[in-house]
Image: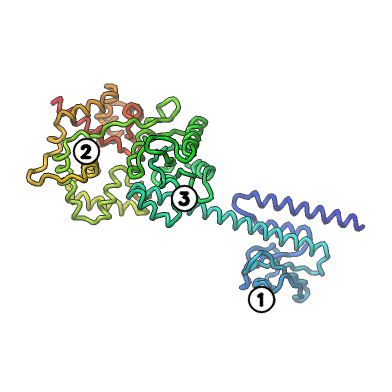
């Protein structure tokens, strides 16, 4: 008889372990009610988990008599606060046993109610169930803490990236509150911009994350604007050599392997830039990524090209740029900053990046448009604005000549150096692609309207533009930042032809 009883108890414990395994594998966390129902089926008792000293029932079997809890209130307080570990009492004709579980207070209490005095086997199984619930609860707490940690680490990495893009390494250091990432100790960096399914980003980031929340000497950041982009900042010396024993090289090789193994992935790689030029490195990676899908390995490296701002005569160009941008001094800094961002990022992306509504972003842009006297919904106006920003940045240390009136933009672009620059930009484009590109610009980058003008389908227009992106190495359709060079090059070519 004793052997049969022991075998029955072992079978019950095996069943409890199977239930634990099922609960531990649940993505949504353990289902306490299923564990309590299992205990009821095995013993016939009704069970409840009381979450705190106030008597809050977290979960219970269907037939649990909740009226027994009110007279138990003083006992539940003592159990929850750790004064007692377990207790047995009588409530009318019902036998009640209470057992606290968990390492610290307020501890939940397992309340077991039956019509007969529980057998030793029932008491043992109840105690085991309480221990199992405590372990499942701790595992769930650990998972929750892990999720919170990863969320905070992701936010910190984004703060470092934002600091680098907005103000350079010093601002990025201040944002880390002492937990300075090794990346900020490097001489330079190269940005790898990975395009992958949104669901894959977390898996890739966590696979390479170290205990500090960084990635060794590198940094992997979820792009807040484009959900399929993963921004990877890899530390390198200024001459392009691997940094810190080759770890940066290792992450770069890992990204190349990911793209090789996954047909839906693509990678754009910037040139090596100092930390103070992280924004330029990101822009290069964006342009490289635009051409990556058309390459055999879906990986494209940025090849440096002289920007238009670099070929214009600095003194008159700076005078024009400052005159163009001066009206922004009359509006708030917030509106001016939002407008600068909106030149290279879609409005919806600016809203997500800054945590604003699209209506708020639009209101900031309208203030800037009224001050500038420009319609920034027009691609040619945005191109002029972007050129003015680039000139004011690259020539910031110079003093403009205030004795002469600033030139107009057409006068500024009429020089031979600008014509040679435009010819270099447009040379890789085939005639058919150039016609499509011109129609797309004239239609204010509306592919449907361009298709009507050319009497072709919208898909054909986009296919031509994708081919043009690959030929130019400039992004036209994702952020649209590469369209501004095309606008200026086409306008310069048209003026020369006229």
**The N terminus is located in which quarter?**
bottom right
Q: Is residue 180 left or right of residue 73?
A: left
Q: Secondary structure at mark 2?
A: helix
Which one is earlier in the sequence, the residue at label 3 or at label 2? 3
User: Residue shown at 13%/26% (left/top)?
Assistant: 498
- Residue 67 position, x and y percent, is 68, 73
Q: Secondary structure at mark 3?
A: helix
Q: Which image quadrant is residue 93 in?
A: bottom right
User: Residue shown at 42%/37% (left/top)?
Assistant: 192
User: Residue shown at 43%/34% (left/top)?
Assistant: 267
- Residue 249 position, x and y percent, is 47, 36
Mark 2 surroundings within 10 Å by alpha-carbon count, few (fewer than 14), some (14 through 19), many (20 or more): many
Q: Is residue 218 left or right of residue 404?
A: right
Q: Nearer the viewer, mark 3 or mark 1?
A: 3
- Does the residue at mark 2 contact the one at mark 1 (Cβ under 8 Å)? no
Q: Which residue is mark 2?
A: 380
- Does the residue at mark 3 contact the one at mark 1 (Cβ under 8 Å)? no
Mark 3 surroundings within 10 Å by alpha-carbon count, few (fewer than 14), some (14 through 19), many (20 or more): many
Please identify the residue farthest to the right as the structure is shown.
Answer: 1
Scheme of colours in the image: rainbow
Q: CA distance from mark 3 to mark 1?
A: 44 Å
Q: Which residue is mark 1?
A: 73
Q: Which image quadrant is residue 112 in?
A: bottom right
The numbered disc on residue 242 is none
Q: CA distance from mark 2 to mark 1?
A: 74 Å
Q: Secondary structure at mark 1?
A: helix
Q: Which residue is mark 3?
A: 154
Q: Which image quadrant is residue 88 in?
A: bottom right
Which one is earlier in the sequence, the residue at label 3 or at label 1? 1
**Taking 236 as reference, is 22 above or below it?**
below
């Amino acid at each position: 008889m004793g052997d049969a009883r022991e075998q029955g108890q072992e079978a019950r414990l095996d069943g409890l372990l199977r239930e634990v395994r099922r609960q531990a594998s649940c993505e949504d966390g353990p289902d306490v009610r299923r564990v309590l129902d299992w205990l009821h089926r095995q013993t016939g008792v009704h069970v409840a988990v009381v979450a705190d000293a106030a008597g809050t029932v977290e979960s219970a079997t269907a037939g649990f008599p909740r009226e027994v809890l009110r007279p138990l209130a003083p006992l539940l307080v003592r159990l929850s606060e750790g004064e007692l570990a377990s207790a047995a009492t009588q409530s009318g004709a019902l036998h009640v046993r209470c057992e606290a579980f968990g390492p610290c207070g307020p501890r939940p209490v397992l309340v077991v109610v039956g019509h007969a005095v529980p057998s030793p086997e029932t008491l043992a199984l109840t105690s085991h169930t309480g221990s199992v619930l405590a372990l499942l609860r701790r595992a769930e707490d650990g998972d929750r803490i892990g999720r919170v940690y990863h969320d905070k680490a992701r936010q910190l990495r984004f703060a470092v990236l934002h600091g680098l893009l907005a103000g350079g390494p010093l601002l990025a250091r201040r944002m880390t509150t002492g937990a300075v990432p090794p990346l900020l100790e490097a001489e330079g960096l190269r940005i790898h911009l990975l395009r992958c399914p949104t669901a894959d980003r977390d898996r890739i980031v966590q696979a390479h994350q170290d205990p500090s929340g960084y990635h060794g000497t590198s940094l992997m950041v979820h792009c807040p604007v484009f959900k399929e982009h993963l921004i990877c900042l890899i530390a390198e010396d200024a001459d392009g050599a691997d940094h810190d024993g080759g770890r940066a090289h290792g992450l770069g090789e890992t990204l190349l392997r990911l793209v090789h193994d996954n047909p839906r992935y693509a990678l754009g790689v910037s040139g090596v830039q100092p930390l103070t030029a992280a924004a330029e490195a990101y822009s290069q990676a964006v342009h490289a990524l635009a051409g990556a899908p058309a390459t055999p390995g879906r990986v494209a490296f940025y090849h440096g090209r002289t920007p238009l701002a670099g070929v214009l005569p600095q003194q008159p160009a700076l005078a024009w740029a400052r005159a163009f941008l001066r009206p922004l001094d009359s509006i708030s800094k917030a509106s001016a900053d939002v407008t600068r961002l909106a030149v290279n990022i879609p409005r919806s992306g600016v809203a997500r990046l800054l945590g604003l509504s699209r209506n708020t972003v639009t209101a900031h842009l309208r203030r800037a448009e009224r001050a500038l006297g420009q319609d920034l919904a027009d691609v040619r106006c945005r191109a002029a604005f972007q050129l003015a920003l680039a000139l004011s940045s690259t020539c910031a240390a110079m003093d403009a000549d205030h004795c002469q009136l600033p030139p107009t933009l057409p006068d500024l672009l009429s020089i031979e150096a600008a014509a040679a620059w435009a010819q270099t930009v447009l040379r890789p484009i085939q005639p058919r692609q150039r016609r499509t590109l011109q129609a797309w610009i004239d239609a204010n980058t509306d592919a449907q309207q361009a298709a009507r003008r050319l009497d072709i389908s919208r898909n054909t227009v986009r296919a031509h533009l994708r081919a043009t992106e690959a030929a130019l190495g400039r992004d036209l359709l994702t952020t649209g930042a590469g369209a501004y060079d095309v606008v200026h090059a086409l306008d310069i070519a048209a003026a020369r032809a006229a």
